[in-house]
Amino acid sequence: MVDSETQDVVAPKPESLLGMRHLMALIMFLATTVSYATRVSMSVGIVAMTSNNSYGYPVFDWSRTTQDTVLSSFFWGYILLQVPAGYIAGRFGGKYLMLISMGVTGVVNLILPIAAVKGDYMAVCGCRIIMGVSQGLLYPSLHGVIGQWVPITERSRLGTFIYAGAQLGTIIELLTSGLLSASSWGWPSVFYVAGALCLIWSAMWLIIGDSAPASSRWISKKERKYIEMNAGSSELGHGRAATPWGSILTSLPFWSILLAHCGQNLGFWTLLTELPSYMKYVLKVDIKQNGMLSALPYVAMYVLSFFFSWFAEFLVNRKIIRLVTSRKIFNTIAHWGPAVALLGLSYLPPGNLTLAVVILTITVGLNGAHYVGFMLSHIDLSPNHASTMMGFTNGIGAVFSILAPLSVSFVVKDESSAMDWRKVFFISVAFYFLTNLFYLLFISADVQDWNDAKPSKAVEDAEKSEEKNPEKTKNNVGEHKF
């Protein structure tokens, strides 16, 4: 295997401070921002949809179980296409999968309010399932594009910048959803705004976005060479390499990423989907304050994620610690830090609003370190197959995202009982602790031997055909594009 921790730069860095890779990172950052805003819209929107309003908008008499079913329905669809999306993105690139993902999400958001009025919660669940299916294409594709566009020495910083958009989207949605719901535009405007933003992003991505530097018409030759020589990917990464499933599924480092992803999803989505309800029923905060206070922990996560990424990159690039040590340290901060904070929260006396918000802010804020922990480990192990691995771990992890709100419905019998919520927090603590322990024991930051797997038989046959008919195919070499 290739030791990525001692790998030297083999192509000169472009003199320009900002290049096409930075513009791509910005657009991908906006993708995670907008996509997460659409996911979170229901967390606050459902509170408004089930509360009386002064403007005559429909109010739905949904039980707690029905509400949790609506909240979890996104993930029923989300898990379906993760692995196929990762495979397709790995073979052909992620540009058009990302376009489909965001475009469909935008359209579904625009029709959701009408669907709710016409078909009640079943229609809303249907919309959220379709939205989940479409967004299931996004992260595997995104991970593959990052693996092709981002050099190793910039991966912690740019990777965190891109994925931290999820927290900014959460912050924006939690802040604006409550305000929009309480305004004369009512709760439907929450979904209309989110849908419009998705469609705007889709138009921008169609014009500028590309799966890899080789297929971009906007990038300079110098920057393209720099990226391709320093990203750890190869020509086999798009449309040529057979997926080494046996090697992946028998790799302990891969399993450590998978378990860390599952622990992260259960803990994070328990808080994300249920925090507005916890604020309302336990801390007695109204809908407008709900959005503001619920957003505060994600502001902390957003800000701290940049500090963690800068610090991680500083430590590794200055050779103070090895890359694998950095991954372990920051993943531990992301998992065990929140576990300790949640233990404190679970024993907090009811009604102590200020201290509860402080602990929740610490809990979610420390979780921002996972962007330079397991989240980038797929690319460390195999830039060429990062999208496939991300599809697999994100798909399995999504099962635990489904379990998050459903476990609350099963455990919490009295929504105003701090004792019932304590049980929910204990479950998250256990998953955070155990999954990170496995990650610490078995993770690696070295590029694996199977990253440069042999081409599939179909590709080998095509190459033989090219050798016999060079004039027919010479213009397509290196320019495969999905």
Image (cartoon, grey):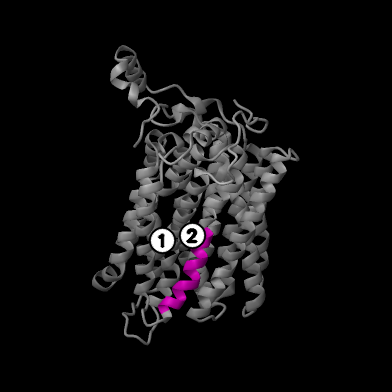
Q: Which residue is mark 2?
A: 404
User: In the image, is 303 to the left or to the right of 266?
Assistant: right
> Distance from label 1 to label 2 (Cα)?
8 Å
Instruction: Give the quarter of the figure containing the N terminus.
Output: top right
Judged from the image, the secondary structure of the residue bearing numbered disc 2 is helix
Towards the viewer: 190 or 71 = 190
Pinpoint residue 225: horizontal percent, then vertical percent: 52, 31
- Quadrant in which the C terminus appears: top left
> In the rendered structure, which disc, 1 or 2, sits on the residue that comes first in sequence?
1
The residue carrying pointer 1 sits among few (fewer than 14), some (14 to 19) or many (20 or more) residues within 10 Å by Cα, namely many
Q: Position of residue 68 (x, y in %)?
A: 42, 66
Q: Can you tell which quarter of the image residue 441 is in? A: top right
* Spot occupied by residue 148 in the image (x, y as percentages of width and height): 49, 37
Q: Residue at x 72, y 44 (%)?
A: 315
- What secondary structure is the stretch in magenta mostly built from? helix
What residue would you read off at disc 1?
72
Compared with residue 297, is residue 236 higher up or lower down, i.e. above or below?
Answer: above
Task: Answer whether residue 170 is magenta in the image.
Answer: yes
Instruction: Name the residue rendered at 54%, 80% in the picture.
Output: 285
The residue located at (64%, 29%) in the rendering is 3
Q: Which residues are magenta?
A: 166-181
Query: Which residue sits at x=53%, y=60%?
Result: 167
Does 95 sit left or right of 253 as displayed? left
Quick one: which residue is furthest to the right in this view? 320
- Where residue 379 sits, quadrant-wise, is top right
Residue 410 in view (yes/no): yes
| In magenta stretch: residue 226 | no
Q: Amino acid at mark 1?
A: Ser
Residue 77 seen in the figure: no
Circle 1/circle 2 CB separation < 8 Å = yes
- What is the secondary structure assignment of the residue under circle 1? helix
Which amino acid type is shown beneath numbered disc 2? Ala
